[in-house]
Amino acid sequence: MSGAGSDTHSIEADVVPGRHLRPWLLALFGYAALTVMLTWPLVVRLPAVLPHDVGDPVLNVWILWWDAHVAPLTERWWNSPMFWPADHDAHSMAGR
């Protein structure tokens, strides 16, 4: 019989485990190496050059990230995921 069944083979046989991760891992390690090369003096002195209280710098970075990813002055912008487990927004919390 020369039907469709004679030419078919398992699709799973063509899949190599981890093959789809290779480009992502290559990009990850490439960007990490580039970051280390471009910021070399800082890499060896991170404990000395980072602020001791990382709370404010991390908060400022998060706020800048949020402003870059959400259109300003929209409902989503005002209702940031900062209060995520709570089911209310910052406006409703201000009146409490």
Image (cartoon, rainbow, N blue to C red):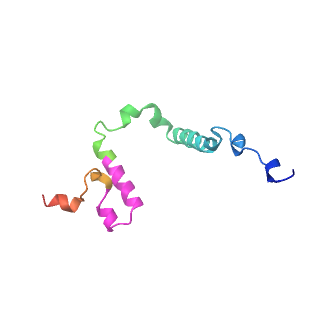
Residue 61 located within the stretch drawn in magenta: yes
User: Which residue does the image show at 28% across and 50% down from the upper left?
Assistant: 85
Prevailing secondary structure of the magenta residues: helix
In the rendered view, would you say 42 is above or below 80? above
Residue 14 image point, x, y percent: 72, 42
Q: Quadrant of residue 91?
A: bottom left
Q: From the viewer's perspective, is 73 left or right of 29?
A: left
User: Looking at the image, is 68 positioned above or below residue 5?
Assistant: below
Locate the C terminus by quadrant: bottom left
As displayed, is residue 52 above or below residue 56?
Answer: above
Residue at the limit of the structure toward the right, as seen here: 1
- Judged left or right of residue 83, residue 7 is right
From the top left corner, tell me how far across and down residue 71 is, in percent: 38, 66
Residue 44 shows in this picture: yes
Q: Quadrant of residue 93?
A: bottom left
Residue segment shown in magenta: 59-80
- The residue sitting at the left extreme is 96
As drawn, the residue found furthest toward the bottom would be 74
On the image, the x and y values in percent for residue 82 come to 29, 52
User: In the image, what residue occupies the spot 32% across and 54% down?
Assistant: 81
Considering every residue shown, the one lying at the far front of the view is 1
Task: Please state which of residues 78 and 47 is positioned toward the viewer in this rendering.
Answer: 78
**How many marks do you count on the picture?**
0
**Can residue 7 be spotted in the picture?**
no
Q: Residue at x 56, y 43 (%)?
A: 31
The reply, left or right, for residue 28 in relation to residue 1 is left
Q: Is residue 78 on the magenta stretch?
A: yes
Q: Toward the viewer: 24 or 61?
A: 24
Nearer-the-camera pick, 88 or 61: 88
Across and down, in percent, residue 12 comes to 68, 42
